[in-house]
Image (spheres, helix red, strand yellow):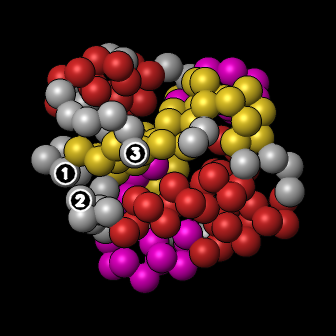
Amino acid sequence: MPVGFHIFPDRGLVVVRYSGMAAIRDTVEATKAYVSHPNFAHGQKQLVDLTQLTDYERDYVAFMLMQASKAGRFANSGTQSLVVYVAPTPIGQELAALFLKSWDDVDAVVPMVQESEAQALAMLGQSETSIPALLAAVDGPALQ
């Protein structure tokens, strides 16, 4: 699937990685799998990796409906979550901007965009300087 995730419960962190063409249905399915995962917890920090994104589905109505559903889940959680998007390419920055705009009125989500993995990881309080180093450090299973 072009969207995968890995939860690091000890770090209060989830890494979401996009690759290739991002379809809205793939994001919806990954979100459902994430929130039903036994290691899911409200308030987990999120690192959304858009470095391998090549394009995304431009159905803006469906995108906003998807984000509204996610916003409702976050808004009712009673916690706040930092979400950092790694977007080093123009296409990644374009999608990250859409995500940021969709969180405008959601106090439970603090979204940020960074161009480098090292900057994003530092913002999330991680000592690793790359996502592969983070994945290797925790020696966990592959992305879901």
In which quadrant will I find the N terminus?
A: top right
**Neighbours of disc 1 within 10 Å: few (<14), some (14-19), many (20+):** few
Q: CA distance from mark 3 to mark 1?
A: 14 Å
Where residue 39 sits: x, y (%)?
Answer: 23, 59
Residue 128 located left or right of residue 92: left
Instruction: Identify the residue under disc 1.
Output: 9
In which quadrant will I find the C terminus?
A: top left
Q: CA distance from mark 3 to mark 2?
A: 12 Å
| The quadrant where residue 87 appears | top right
Q: Amino acid at mark 3?
A: Gln
Instruction: Identify the residue under disc 3.
Output: 144
Q: What mark, if any, has residue 39 been given in the picture?
A: 2
Sequence-wise, the earlier of marks 3 and 1 is 1
Which residue is at 50% across, 36% downward?
17
Please say if the residues under marks 2 and 1 sit with CB atoms less than 8 Å apart. yes
Residue 131 located left or right of residue 4: left
Where residue 27 sits: x, y (%)?
Answer: 61, 54
5 magenta-colored = no
87 magenta-colored = yes
Q: Amino acid at mark 1?
A: Pro
Secondary structure state at the residue bearing disc 2 = loop
Which residue is at 48% across, 76% downward?
73
Decide if residue 87 is in sight here.
Answer: no
Secondary structure state at the residue bearing disc 1 = loop
Where residue 3 sits: x, y (%)?
Answer: 55, 43
Q: What mark, if any, has residue 107 been given in the picture?
A: none
Q: Amino acid at mark 2?
A: Asn
Compared to 3, does 27 lie above or below? below
Q: CA distance from mark 2 to mark 1?
A: 6 Å
Secondary structure state at the residue bearing disc 3 = loop
